[in-house]
Amino acid sequence: MTTTTAAEAGMLGCHACGLLSRPSAAGHTLECARCGASLHVRKPYSISRTWAFLIAAAILYIPANVLPVMETGSLFGAQKDTILSGVVYLWTSGSWPLAAIIFVASIMVPGGKLLALTVLLISVQRRSSWKPFERTKLYRMVELVGRWSMVDIYVVAILTALVQFKALATIKAGPGAIAFGAVVVLTMFAAESFDPRLIWDPLEERQRHG
Amino acid sequence: MSMTSLIACRECDLLQREIVLPPGGTACCSRCGAVLYRNKPDSLDRTLAFTVGAAVLFILANVFPVVGLEAQGNRTSTTLFGTVRTLHDQGMTSVAVLVFVTAILMPALDIGAMLYMLLPIRLGVVPKGLPAMFRLVHTAVGHGRGVHARNSGVAGEALAHRGRPAGHCTVVVRHADVPCRRRRRILRGP
């Protein structure tokens, strides 16, 4: 059975309310007749935007992991902790479930997102028709985990506000926290600007020509 | 065939014919498996109940301290906004902004916009500026992303009255699929 996409049928689906409209040939800006959202066949400049956010996130991923996210000051001296040193400390002090949570949420998930989006972008740019179902699923996962990667920032935020015992002990957020927050936000924007329909477009083309 | 009975998958753009769902049913894209729309029983009442509950808890969450700590007679506690202020005082303004936006502003906007839309609709009135509010919730706040709002949310139902009867469509269209299944038999390249 042949399949048809909305784009092939000359129709645009509203990204906000889902209404399908058939745009007139006139070149004015297109708006959804029902909810007023602007209409696009595909997200505008999807690939270049996603690359831009992705590359920025990849660069900041380095300081996020190298610079300290937390600076602890106490009677016994100051200590600076990176994400990884925090994980190691938790692991050696016996709280390995916590260590695992921080490791997965703060190191593996952002790294995995960068990797997944790179794979998606390259495959889309090469107009690959390789496993579109699995790639769509991968994209869904990237979108889903986006809002769960802020754990580290919240932990640091709560600790800095809480541990303020003047001379005894103080905790400050380190410069790594800024980089880490930026990585989380940038990967969220990257996932948002990627258009999963691009994964399926090469299949339509082959169907039409072959 | 009117265009209102057609739906485009927002993840793979496949055109499909809408099907009638039993209560609690979910329609999925027959090609990529994305959720197209749902038929949720008592959608308006339930959404409103959860939103009102969330609003009450959100106020409590911001008024009372989120955590407290006692060490050698010293006691400290902090509210959600207190964490933002401390971060700002330490010169970490960007992190403070991030925490404020994600933990306070976005939930507040989400709850506020939902109440603004749902309360009047529950009373049988279409609130002013509904389309703009609807777009705010669905795009900026990211609420209910991935599901066609018209069929999932009641706000969408109110919006549906604004829908234009559309022209004709002559393409071969598959039916949306129910229930959700893993589809692997996809048109791979020749």
Image (cartoon, coloured by chain):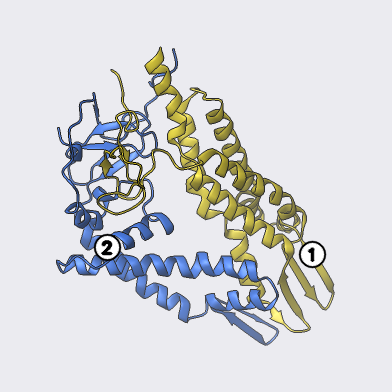
In the image, is residue A80 above or below residue B86? above
Categorize mark 1 by other alpha carbons within 10 Å: few (<14), some (14-19), many (20+).
Answer: some
Query: Front-most of B177 and B71?
Result: B177
Question: What residue is rendered at 39% in x and 19% in y?
Answer: B187
Residue B6: numbered disc: none
Chain that is blue in the image: B
Check the image and name the residue furthest to the bottom.
B73
Task: Give the CA distance from mark 1 to mark 2.
Answer: 50 Å
In the image, is residue B150 above or below residue A162? above
Check the image and name the residue furthest to the right.
A77
In the image, is residue A69 above or below residue B58? above
Looking at the rendering, in which quadrant would you find the C terminus of chain A? Answer: top left
Residue B130: numbered disc: 2
Q: In this figure, which residue is indicated by the disc labeled 1?
A: A80
- Chain of residue at mark 2: B
Return the x and y of residue B53 as percentages of the image width and height.
32, 70
Compared across the picture, whether A136 is left or right of A81 comes to left
Contact between marks 1 and 2 (CB within 8 A): the answer is: no
Question: What residue is rendered at 70% in x and 74% in y?
Answer: B91
Q: Secondary structure at mark 2?
A: helix
Q: Nearer the viewer, mark 1 or mark 2?
A: 2
Residue B132 found in image quarter: bottom left
User: Does the image show residue B176?
Assistant: no
- Chain of residue at mark 1: A
Amino acid at circle 1: Lys
Chain A is shown in which shade? yellow
Q: Secondary structure at mark 1?
A: strand
Compared across the picture, whether A137 is left or right of A12 comes to right
